[in-house]
């Protein structure tokens, strides 16, 4: 082989190695950027107020009618970070009924929900209409979501809420076999609009306060249709928490119960500290 041939071979090898290195660097940078993007909230954030900072370490350590704030359909980068900010600042624990597909897409938000002491519950995989599902489909909606939630948090969910609040015999059979709740419902006895109807902050404060009574489970959302509502609507949450506390309420989380709750659609669940 001539000197020129060897030189051409060396140059070709160097070109190949440089191209390969560039591909690896670009791939790593893309992966890093993708991971960073997953940690970025896409909606507003909440900053604690002076009133928040003056709260005692455990504001719930007092008697009073107890309510649970429950959030469905999440997590989402548009709404969940703000809601968690508010709950942390107000020192309120809540119950999150999470969808499996959203959980799989945003595990870092599920980790935060769990780490900050909230209850992680099952809201099926992709918000299916259970009356139309086969037995196999109903089982997959529930068990697949359980699996991804347990993989992230290390805890198997014991609570389940049907999408749209619509049960099915096949879904009930799966829940019974797994020893899960019979489908946690909620209290909504007024004609006040819910958050997914985008009524605005004032109307939502009115809705939450109207529905609040001892053992009430209040239906709210941190994803789904609520994402399309004006961001200013989110101001309802800190205002409603402050108003309920001013009225003597304390906050709790949802837990399984052997006794049906007529107040919450017959759910075998209760609001506990």
Image (spheres, helix red, strand yellow):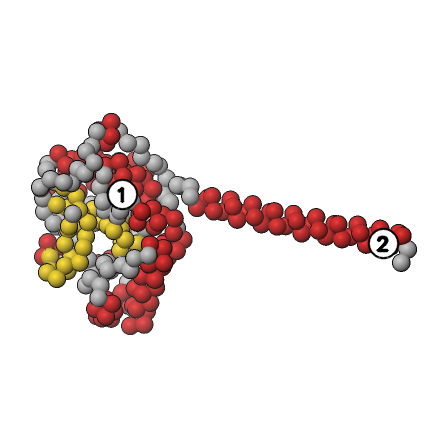
* Relative side of 172 to 28, left or right: left
Q: Secondary structure at mark 1?
A: loop
Q: Is 24 in front, or is 167?
A: 24
Name the outermost residue toward the right: 2
Q: Is residue 148 above or below residue 66?
A: below
Image quadrant occupied by the N terminus: bottom right
The mark total stands at: 2
Secondary structure of residue under mark 2: helix
Determine whether, in the image, residue 244 is placed left or right of residue 42.
Answer: left
Residue furthest top in the image: 50
Can the viewer see residue 246? yes
Residue 3 position in % (x across, y down): 89, 52
Is any atom of residue 203 visible in this view? no
The x, y position of residue 161, in whole percent, is: 23, 58
> What residue is rendered at 85% in x and 54% in y?
6
Name the residue: 63% across, 50% down: 23
The reply to whether dot 2 and dot 1 touch (C-beta < 8 Å) is: no
* Residue 241 locus on image (x, y percent): 19, 38
Residue 242 lies in quadrant: top left
Quarter of the view holding residue 124:
bottom left
- Measure the alpha-carbon separation of dots 2 and 1: 72 Å
Q: Residue at x 19, y 63 (%)?
A: 182
The residue that mark 2 highlights is 6
Badge 1 crowding class, 10 Å Cα cut-off, few under 14, some 14 to 19, many 20 or more, is some
Front disc: 2 or 1: 2
Identity of the residue drawn at 88% across and 52% down: 4
Q: Which residue is farthest bottom?
A: 135
**Residue identifier under label 1:** 198
Q: Position of residue 25 (x, y in %)?
A: 61, 47
Between disc 2 and disc 1, whose residue precedes? Answer: 2
């Amino acid at each position: 082989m001539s000197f020129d041939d060897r030189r051409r071979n060396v140059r070709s090898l160097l070109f190949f190695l440089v191209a390969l290195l560039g591909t690896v660097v670009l791939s790593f940078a893309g992966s890093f950027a993708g991971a960073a993007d997953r940690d970025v909230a896409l909606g507003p954030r909440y900053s604690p107020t002076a009133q928040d900072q003056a709260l005692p370490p455990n504001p719930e350590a007092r008697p009073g009618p107890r309510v649970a704030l429950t959030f469905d359909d999440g997590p989402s980068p548009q709404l969940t970070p703000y809601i968690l900010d508010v709950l942390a600042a107000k020192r309120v624990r809540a119950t999150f009924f999470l969808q499996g597909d959203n959980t799989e897409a945003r595990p870092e938000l599920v980790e935060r929900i769990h780490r900050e002491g909230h209850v992680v519950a099952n809201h099926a995989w992709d918000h299916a209409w259970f009356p139309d599902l086969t037995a196999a489909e109903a089982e997959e909606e529930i068990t697949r979501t359980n699996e991804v939630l347990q993989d992230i948090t290390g805890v198997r969910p014991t609570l389940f809420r049907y999408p749209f609040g619509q049960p099915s015999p096949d879904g009930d059979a799966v829940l019974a076999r797994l020893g899960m709740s019979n489908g946690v419902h909620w209290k909504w006895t007024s004609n006040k609009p819910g958050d997914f109807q985008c009524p605005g902050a004032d109307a939502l404060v009115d809705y939450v306060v109207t529905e609040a009574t001892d053992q009430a489970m209040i239906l709210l959302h941190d994803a789904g249709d609520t994402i399309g509502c004006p961001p200013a609507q989110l101001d309802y949450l800190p205002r409603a928490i402050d108003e309920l506390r001013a009225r003597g309420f304390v906050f709790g989380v949802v837990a399984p119960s052997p006794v049906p709750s007529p107040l919450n659609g017959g759910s075998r669940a209760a609001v506990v500290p």
